[in-house]
Amino acid sequence: MTEKKGTIHQLSELGEFGLINRLTSHLTIHNKSTLKGVGDDCAVLDFNNKKTVVTTDMLTEGVHFNLMYVPLKHLGYKAVVVNLSDVYAMNAIPKQITVSMALSSKFSIEAIDELYAGIRLACDNYGVDLVGGDTTSSMTGLVLSITALGKVEEEDVVFRSGAKPTDLLCVSGDLGGAYMGLQLLERENEVFKVNPKMQPQLEGYDYILERQLKPEARRDMLKVFADQKIRPTAMIDISDGLSSEIMHICEASGTGCKLFEDRIPMDDQTKQMAEELNINPLVAALNGGEDYELLFTIPVGEYDKIRNHPDITVIGHITEKSEGANLVTAGSGQEIPLMAQGWNPLKDQE
């Protein structure tokens, strides 16, 4: 973990309330809906007649991140963004977050300052207010839990459950990059364990490293939908892998789908890293996760509205439930049942 040089201070020097004051005293309020932020028993919010969406994600050291190669500032930024991505997936605009942390004694005050610098940067970049949270001690490392709140008009809410047969299955951006960035970092970490003097070989892979360490939520897609007068019939963000997210939409909507292998967008760096590590790039796209792109369905009649958009790809279509959820392979056109093999935090770790 990277810290500024100088005197290192222990968390015990400040105590819980001193730490909270240190971390929150310079927060900026971005939204009129925030009537009261940090500093009372509860935050007070006013969304008038709009609907509120709420989401929570927890990140645990050793499960979701490794501080051997994840800078604390990047971790703070990413922890916020993964929550905002869920809000955008509901076609809503994030407005507030709360941040709760469990900290072990190995962390200095300066280290937590760095973590919060990333949190504040994300709040500033996305116009979100930090309005509360909690801190406590941990025996095992760092745990971050962030809750995000957003607002949306009732008629604009998009659920996972609205997809219908013949709807087009679309995705923003490209897939698999975050997973390949993680594999690169893991490889270099193993090299470091054997030879700490060896410089990491990361040159030429800036894109996939950023996809892993500092992802961005796709708020720009909501502007595309509004400008083109598109209301997706179903939507979800890709946090656990494309195959898992497609299955979520199909299960919630009571449908099947056809996903075409040759339509899945992948960046050249993703393919290059996959080849270097002898990994099928399709596996990275289907099962890797952490891309935080938006997967959504639209009526086939709205195809012309997105056909020329450089960052939206039609990757398949929705079918009747009886047809199942299938991957159509490139070349042979063989249909293979999709398996939800994305990230599962409760799976036994080998």
Image: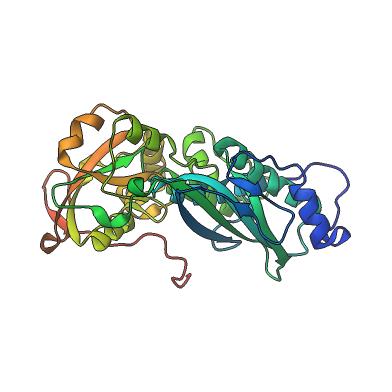
Q: Where is residue 113 in the image (x, y as percent from the top left)?
A: 75, 47
Q: Where is residue 205 in the image (x, y as percent from the top left)?
A: 49, 36
Q: Position of residue 25 (x, y in %)?
A: 77, 46
Left or right, residue 249 beside residue 318: right
Question: Residue drawn 25% across and 54% down?
Answer: 162
Q: Which of 152 and 20 is in front in this view?
A: 152
Determine if residue 67 is in view.
no
Left or right, residue 262 beside residue 67: left
Q: How many marks?
A: 0
Q: Nearer the viewer, residue 97 or 173?
A: 97
Left or right, residue 27 beside residue 90: right
Q: In which quarter of the image is residue 245?
A: bottom left
Whether residue 205 is situated above or below residue 325 in the rendered picture: above
Q: Position of residue 127 (x, y in %)?
A: 57, 38
Q: What scheme was used to colour the molecule?
A: rainbow
Whether residue 61 is situated above or below residue 290 in the rendered picture: below
Determine if residue 282 is in view.
yes
Q: Which of 257 and 99 is in front in this view?
A: 99
Question: Residue drawn 52% across and 48% down?
Answer: 47
